[in-house]
Image (cartoon, helix red, strand yellow):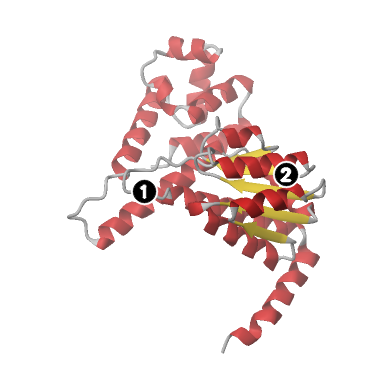
Amino acid sequence: MKSIILNIRAKYDEMGRGERKIADALLADPQSILSCSISEFALGIGCGDATVVRFARRLGLSGYGDLKIAIAREISTLSNETATISKSDSCFDMFSKRINDIRIALENTKSVLDADTLEQAAQAIMKAKRIVIFGLGNSASIAQDAQHKFLRVGLNAAACSDNHLQAIIASHLDKDSVAIGISHSGNSVDIVDALRIARLSGATTICITNHRISPVTEVSDLCLFTKSAETRHSLLAMSSRIAQLTIFDAIYTYVIAKNDPAAAEAIKATETALREKKY
């Protein structure tokens, strides 16, 4: 059965103002509908009962009751699929559970990632004369991967995972620079400091984080949000790492598609340089 959350996102552009209010509320907190009558839910959203019914029918449902059932079923499915890893699991069982965790993280990230903000971030990165990506600990490898992708298409990109160097680099940026900070928690003191210094230097600052209300968002011009409910066995926020990588993959693809001649030449030059590295 198709995800009701993904269906809401797919139909979002077709909706009127009232229906979009409902969509926004359900995308932000799907469980908010479960304990409400249609009148209570509509009052909380600021629309009429008829708008809620129209919203449900737009999604191919018969009415409010079916909408609640669809939301409840999806919440239940997601809860079951993110089963805890147990000692009795085979490695393949664990592999299957990780796939489910990752799929859910990507679907959830899609529900919270603002399309306009992602577009602005991609444009800023594509036009920047200098790009720096800050990541520490678990985020360091994400920063390195982003650097690798951007360099392949001819962008002037560098990743930094040393907190002292991050501050130094940030202090020498300017209005033609973009600084990207990766912090799942949004609470990394060094990443926040680096973006704060970069912003004071005139750079456009972008953060990738799982937490909308966090210090890193306060020093970022553009905020790209992931949504990953890490479980006890995901001590390194593994699912959110995939979501972060996918955001960078999307921006990398965007640069290639929107900047065809320059990106194509850069990729050709990269392949030529690497040719002798292979048998």
Quadrant where the C terminus sits is bottom right
Give the CA distance from mark 1 to mark 2.
Answer: 32 Å
Residue at 62% in and 37% down: 114
Say which label, 1 or 2, has the lower sequence index.
2
x%, y% of residue 87? 19, 54
The residue type indicated by label 2 comes to Ala
Quadrant where the N terminus sits is top left
Given the current orientation, which residue lies at the most extreme front position? 164
Residue at 59% in and 25% down: 20
Circle 2 residue: 198
Left or right: 257 with respect to 69? right
Other residues around mark 1 within 10 Å, as few (<14) / some (14–19) / many (≥20): some
x%, y% of residue 209? 55, 41
x%, y% of residue 41? 46, 14
Residue at 27% in and 45% down: 84
Picture layout, residue 6 above or below residue 94? above
Given the current orientation, which residue lies at the most extreme right position? 175
